[in-house]
Image (spheres, rainbow, N blue to C red):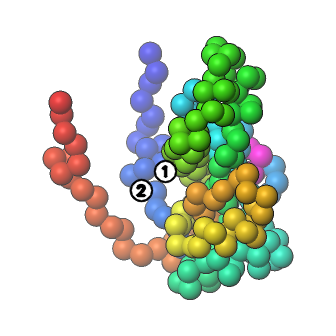
Amino acid sequence: MTQSLDSSALDQLFLAARTYNKFTTEPVSDDLLKQLYDLYKWGPTSMNTQPGRVVFVRSVEGKERLKPALMPNNVEKTMAAPVVAIVAFDSAFYEHMPTQFPANPGARDMFANNAGLSAETASRNSALQGAYLIMAARALGLAAGPMSGFNPAAVNEAFFPDGRLKVNFLINLGWGDPSGNRPRGPRLAFEDSVVMA
């Protein structure tokens, strides 16, 4: 039987974890970003679709391409973050299904022939993969600051002009500087958020 994580692990992943708005200037290495991927890729997606794609933006040039798409209050913190992860989805994710979900030989065509199902699956599961990325980052000691305050069309034009990939959301990543943290927001009580059926 799988054992529960200890309290320090639960604190790091959830209970004491924060959304970071400020990071130190220490860089995040290529090796750590590969380690991050090798961890979060194991999070489940429906039918192992794995539609999520990530662009790790670190260069000055890359950030300048991203900057015009950001809402004004997100510019400074994003430009200062060591890494900005553009969490996107591959609208033709189903092309990989013959190798990624061989248990169902018809899976590729099921999505390829149903644009609505394909788009819904890509959006939902890439969001899941982005959440796994956040948790994996926390597990590796990195801080994360997810954002939806940007112009998706502008991000897509700057980074995905062929239209196959589409942005879902952004995550600033780095070594957290708690001086930029706001007071922690409350969470809904169990009875306000959960129904037992």
Give the x, y percent position of residue 40. 63, 41
How crowded is the residue under tag 2: few (<14 C-alpha within 10 Å), some, or many (20+)?
Answer: few
Question: Which quadrant of the figure contains the C terminus?
Answer: top left
**Which residue is painted at 42% across and 56% down in the image?**
16
**Which residue is painted at 67% across and 60% down in the image?**
86
Q: Is residue 173 left or right of residue 7?
A: right
Please say if 18 is above or below 88.
below
What amino acid type should be assigned to the residue bearing mark 2?
Ala
Q: Which residue is mark 2?
A: 16
Please say if 23 is above or below 187.
below
Give the x, y percent position of residue 146. 54, 63
Indicate the quadrant where residue 38 lies: top right
Q: Which residue is mark 1?
A: 12
Give the x, y percent position of residue 18. 46, 62
Q: Is residue 73 left or right of residue 91?
A: left
Question: Which segment did they paint magenta?
Answer: 32-36
**Which residue is painted at 42% across and 30% down in the image?**
4
Q: Is residue 30 left or right of residue 136?
A: right
| Label 1 element class | helix
How far is disc 2 from disc 1 in space, using C-alphas?
A: 6 Å
Q: Main secondary structure of the magenta part?
A: helix
Give the x, y percent position of residue 12. 49, 50
Can you tell which mark lies on residue 84? none
Kindly check if marks 2 and 1 are in contact, taking CB atoms under 8 A apart as contact. yes
What amino acid type should be assigned to the residue bearing mark 1?
Gln
**Which residue is painted at 64% across and 14% down in the image?**
103
| Label 2 element class | loop
Q: Residue furthest front?
A: 113
Q: For this rendering, which residue is in front, 194 or 157?
A: 157
Tell me if residue 139 is in the magenta stretch.
Answer: no
Q: For this rendering, which residue is in front, 113 or 11?
A: 113
Indicate the quadrant where residue 67 lies: bottom right
